[in-house]
Image: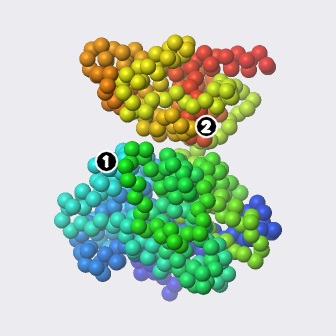
Amino acid sequence: MDVHESALELIGRTPLVRLRTPDDGRSAPVYAKLEYLSVGGSIKDRIALGMIEQAERDGLLRPGGTVIEATSGNTGAGLALVAAAKGYRAVLVLPDRTSAEKIATLRAFGAEVEVRPAGLPAEDPEHPLNVAARIAEQTPGAWLAGQYDNPANPGAHYLTTGPEIWRQTDGRITHLVSCIGTGGTISGTGRYLKEASGGTVRVIGADPASSVYSGGDGRPYFVEAAGHFRHPETVEDVWPQSYHQDVVDDVLPVTDRDSLLTVRRLAREQGLLVGGSAGTAVAAAERVAAGLGPDDLVVVILPDSGRQYLSKYFDDGWLLRLGFLDGDGSAARVGDALPAAVRAQPLPYVNRRATVGEALALLRARRAGGAEPVLPAGPCPTGGERRPTAPELSGSLALDTLTRAVELGQIAPGDPVGDHLGAPLPQFGAGQPAVAALAELTERGVETAVVLHDGQAVGLIGPQDLHAVLRAAGAAR
Ligand code: PMP
């Protein structure tokens, strides 16, 4: 019989499929390793099994025990599935930015899920990693998987992913391209392939452009589960021990726009429905292949399926709202209300650690300049070139409310504004229709909104700006 005895036997052993690349025929062939075909739907099944079986061998996890982890989803699904198949309880802590589909998947496997706010500094006691560590301390029989620092994470890829690729390509692979999250995939797979090839295989990381691994400042980005985000208030930025930099020859930055447009292309043109980090990896692999010849062979790792991101990367509305799509150019768009000169200036913005006195000065200067005295505020540093990203527009300040709070003695001019922020301002993608944005502002009675391009704030607009572009568009017709 050609059968398997449990779901655990269906982890890994994923196929390689040739990708059609823009330079196909002239450049190196690119083969994609389809990790979404593993039984739990992602590459993380491998490390879930590897880490749990190592913990069993080490006596850290015993029958009746509880598996605990802070995870953005795929490791959780892997752990929940292996825990279910082996009869353990699983408790998983996730940031609230995680897609609803991923959270539902964990619950479907019977895991208990704790959701905590995303975007907290690493030191915050409510940061998912700190919450998971606390639960592990307080739960008898608990074992914290700790994928960021667990040697069994890169170890699982050294033992499975690397040998599979070597065997499947008959030892002809010359370049490996992979995203870096915990670093387990690239470190374990890369180390095996370097050893097997006598050191000739080149290992290339693909990284969201603002992630720190490729030299970015760590600001938020929109591709889930890859790269390394650094909160501006994080004091000491610690990199995972699962990431072995000595194995990696180069790390290429890939913009969110490139990653997202690449995953959409893979689905529409090649029938491969994969997640955002696969877009990051393929965009980098295409760049690598373009510089190589037909005797080289590139393998790129596609970590998970696009099904769990249908409401994000594959939803035009989501992309349009964040400014990743340019919209319908035949009608007036929100971005048309923002002259190039305004876009080129830094966005007026208040860091939440600024004092009330500093914020009042900025708001008064705005009123004196004839603008609405309202500003977006949040954790983004101010003063440099850096523009706040959509999740950093977490609050707002209005001159009236702040002045009143000072007069009533609720806050002193020397206090930080952070505890007194109002609701975030509405956000519109530059490609959204101006008519719809104006209707929303009018309905909400709001005078200031933020315009986003590629997920970053590029300017502030009000109803009068939208009226102006609509009038101009009407006159041109
Ligand atoms: N992409 C996806 C979808 C993932 O779930 C992960 C794991 N967080 C990665 C990429 C990065 O893999 P690794 O943690 O092994 O570096």
Viewer can see residue 308: no
Give the residue at mark 1: 124
**Image location of residue 326, percent across then percent down:** 68, 37
Q: Which quadrant is home to the C terminus?
A: top right
> Which residue in the rendered view is the most extreme toward the bottom?
1
Residue 351's place in the image compared with 305, above or below, is above
Q: Residue at x 47, y 80 (%)?
A: 159
The local crowd at label 2, few if under 14, some if 14 to 19, many if 20 or more residues have their Cα within 10 Å, is: many
Depth check, mark 2 against mark 1: the one in front is 1
**Image location of residue 119, percent across then percent down:** 41, 45
Q: Residue at x 45, y 29 (%)?
A: 350
Quarter-of-image position of residue 355 = top left
Q: Residue at x 56, y 26 (%)?
A: 460
Give the residue at mark 2: 453
In the image, 283: left or right of 129?
right
Q: Which mark is residue 383?
A: none
In this rendered view, identify the residue nearer to me: 83 or 209. 209
Q: Residue at x 67, y 27 (%)?
A: 341
Residue 120's place in the image compared with 32, above or below, is above
**Image location of residue 234, percent across then percent down:** 38, 48
Q: Amino acid at mark 1?
A: Asp
